[in-house]
Image (cartoon, helix red, strand yellow):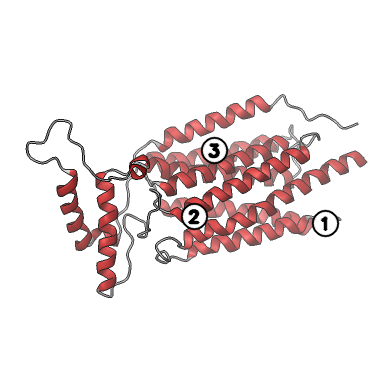
Amino acid sequence: MRQARPSSSTAPRAAALAVALLALALLAACPASVAASAGDRSFEYQSCLQACVARDCTPPAGAAAGWTPQRPESAVLRATLWDCPHDCRYECMHAATQAAQAAGRPVQQFHGKWPFVRLLGMQEPASVVFSFFNGLAHFRGVTKYTKALGRHAYPLYGLVRLSGLLSINTWVWSAVYHTRDFDITERLDYFSAMASIVMSLHIAIVRVLRLPRRHVLRPLVAVTLLAFFVAHVSYLSFWRFDYGYNMKAGIAIGVLFDLVWLAWAAANWSEKRHYAWKIVVFVVMLSAAMSLELLDFPPIAGILDAHSLWHAATIFAIPVYWDFLISDALDHVRRVKLL
């Protein structure tokens, strides 16, 4: 007879997730400074921007009290929160880029970003689309995992599902951020991504060390990782938003995640866990995808850059990860039944 999966902890986990997401939203609302780039410091860009704002965004003499700029005219652009100054930024960014290319100068970044061609109001349309498919891949993974394990008693069932929900949340905010880059969308994207990889590392450590719920090390691991995450978010929110530190911290957590699972795979390769290869393939695929971030080139056709290609590559790695998690959980259930 199959043992029913305990459900008493569902409500606390859901409450914890809600509190975490609320905390992310509140911290993300703190103002951040945006570093200037070579493109937006150029004479062509600055002169164009000043003229555009003065012409289209500044009320003329004798204007009525309710005067509003006529640009952008598109309802789609207005719906995606493009206002007159930002529309002028976009227009002048491409005007300055065309002038630079005509003079034989290289394409520059503007306000920390390459000059992308917007589509339906999306600043980085390729990254938006790829973020959607990454989120969809995680949604399918969580659904498949739930169907496979829902009727079994697996100790990490709730944690793995929570991790999946955090991953979906990450890619939702990635799509929002790449649609419109504001301080709050940027922070929700970055903080959600860190929450997701910290949770994945937590699951990896608990699983590899085989820490039962009441083991003394299990809350220690959880508290340590939670303290790191809170300190990370607090530093970036209340001191300064250090992009270099944020990237290094994310890479460090990701490398730890890879090493933990690769050590497990090496130790279990000969224990008839025929599925161990899946996590190795996932780590290799993810590492190869992340290496695309080391490349940095102007977007091809104004759409595809290294960052968007990284998002495209991870779409194919996610199903491998979920297949591994399902295989590992079912293997645990089978071994428990044989005892």
Q: Which residue is mark 1?
A: 274
Amino acid at circle 3: Ala
Q: Which residue is mark 2?
A: 248
Q: Earlier in the sequence, mark 2 or mark 3?
A: 3
Left-right relation of 296 to 33: right
Depth check, front residue: 286 or 258: 286
Mark 1 and mark 2 residues within 8 Å of each other at the beta carbon: no
Depth check, front residue: 227 or 90: 90
Q: Earlier in the sequence, mark 1 or mark 2?
A: 2
Where does the image place residue 321, in percent across and percent down from the top left?
A: 68, 52
Q: Is residue 327 above or below residue 94?
A: above
Left-right relation of 276 to 252: right
Category of crowding for the residue at label 3, using alpha-carbon neighbours closer than 10 angstroms: few (below 14), some (14–19), many (at least 20): few
User: Alpha carbon of mark 3 to alpha carbon of mark 1: how far?
Assistant: 36 Å
| Residue 328 marker | none
Amino acid at circle 1: His
Depth check, front residue: 320 or 60: 60
